Image: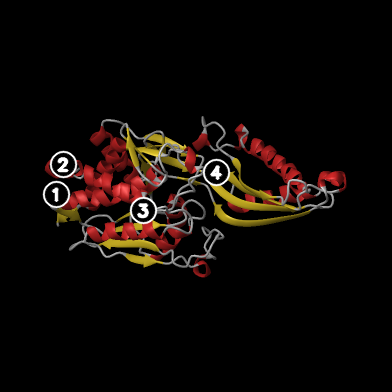
Amino acid sequence: MSLDPGIRRAILDAVAALEAESVAALERLVRCPSTLGNEASALEEMARNYASLGLEPRRVPTLPEELAAHPGFSPPLISYDGRDNVVAVHRPREAKGRSLVLQGHVDVVPEGAAEIWATPPFEPSIRDGRMYGRGAGDMKAGDISNVMAFRALQMAGLQPAAEVQFHSVIEEECTGNGALACMLALPKCDAVIIPEPGPGVEGLYTAEVGVIWAWVTVTGRPVHVRDMQAGVNAIEAAYVISQRFKAYEAEMNRAENIHSSFFGVNHPVNVNFGTVQGGEWNSSVPTRAKIGLRVGIMMGNTARRVKADIERLVAEAAADERLRGTKVGLEFAGFMADPCVFDKQAPIVQMVQRHFAEANGRELRDYPASGLTDGRFFQLYQGTPVACFGPDADAIHGIDESVGLDSFHATTRCIALTLAEWCGVEKA
């Protein structure tokens, strides 16, 4: 059943009336420098946003001892003390419709070289219809769209006639454990919306790769540089290991290893050397080098099997003649995430596509992602359909990240209309 035309118009008018407030709310959230371990200010801001809707925010801790046995758990990088997720739940007077989760992550990746940003990364700047700032696109615009969609219904004198859960979570960028904790702490809903951005397009996530983070430490034999032939250079040894992973990456991107969800996507499985630490002195052969790896996982493979592949590759490299005399260590911390295909035929996905097109005059573009989202938890481990889609964002994880403000408002319109139709409405 489609929305009553009068209700539809009232909701769209409310979203339009909220545009300036929405931009201001996004600016406040982008000002929160919510990198790993520093999410508190953004979590507090989202708690204030939920309270402004008349909902009671509450904290959900991420407890490794309770999550470790779950197949979606990833080994953490740092302590979870003082970093509790924030949730809020709307309950109707009389539940008539279908329940919904509106989820988003508040964590952002490091800003990189701040001095080469056009404007400071945590001082939002609007230029040519786009807001610039770390996290503006990934995914603080989506966080605010979730809030403002609900607010639009309230402005129209309505509220959802079903339970609506809001989840603001940590560590989407490195483990997903915040999303897992919230999913398990609250009752299962009928569907989930996660307004993650598309890379330069308004994208609907159709599939996503899995990811493993691994850390390889090489301990060499240090000597004075004048005797370097007698030593073993740990940095050079780490390079030998890295080359084996690039060969593995090429193998995983062979056509026969690519799932049909990714046909036509160039190089969907990526191995990234994201961090490197090593050496003590320019005139000493370095003792130790540590490289941080991110290894993508295609459908048809699993995190468990790729973990075994990584262990094998490192063991083979350690036996290389060029590494004679070194010690090679391997540890896993961060993502241990399986790949996921989303159900495009799910009613929530079909509804989102319809409302986006009708309200905005353009279609969401299918996006099989070579990265990953928190949507996998609900799809893989709860069997809950997920509509993961969002605004046009540029330079995600890069310099001068931005989100299109028109696209931001388009996302809010879509969520508001979907919220009303999926859940049904009653008078506020």
Pick the front one: 420 or 232: 232
The answer to whether 287 is drawn above or below residue 344 in the figure is below
CA neighbours of label 2 inside 10 A, class few (<14), some (14 to 19), many (20+): some
Residue 172 lies, in percent from the top left, at 46, 53
Mark 2 vs 1: CB contact within 8 A: yes
- Kindly identify the residue that appears in the image at 52 percent across and 32 percent down: 265
Q: Amino acid at mark 4?
A: Met
Q: Amino acid at mark 3?
A: Gln
Residue 15 lies, in percent from the top left, at 20, 43
Q: CA distance from mark 2 to mark 1?
A: 8 Å
CA neighbours of label 4 inside 10 A, class few (<14), some (14 to 19), many (20+): some
The answer to whether 418 is drawn above or below residue 55 in the figure is above
Which residue is label 1 attached to?
156
Which residue is label 3 attached to?
103
- Kindly identify the residue that appears in the image at 83 percent across and 49 percent down: 224
Mark 3 or mark 4, which has the lower sequence index?
3
Mark 1 or mark 3, which has the lower sequence index?
3
Q: Amino acid at mark 2?
A: Asp
Q: Nearer the viewer, mark 4 or mark 1?
A: 1
Which residue is label 4 attached to?
299
Dot 3: element: strand
Which residue is label 2 attached to?
13
Image quarter of residue 353: top left
CA neighbours of label 3 inside 10 A, class few (<14), some (14 to 19), many (20+): many
Mark 1 vs 3: CB contact within 8 A: no
Mark 2 or mark 3, which has the lower sequence index?
2
Q: Nearer the viewer, mark 3 or mark 4?
A: 3
Q: CA distance from mark 3 to mark 4?
A: 24 Å
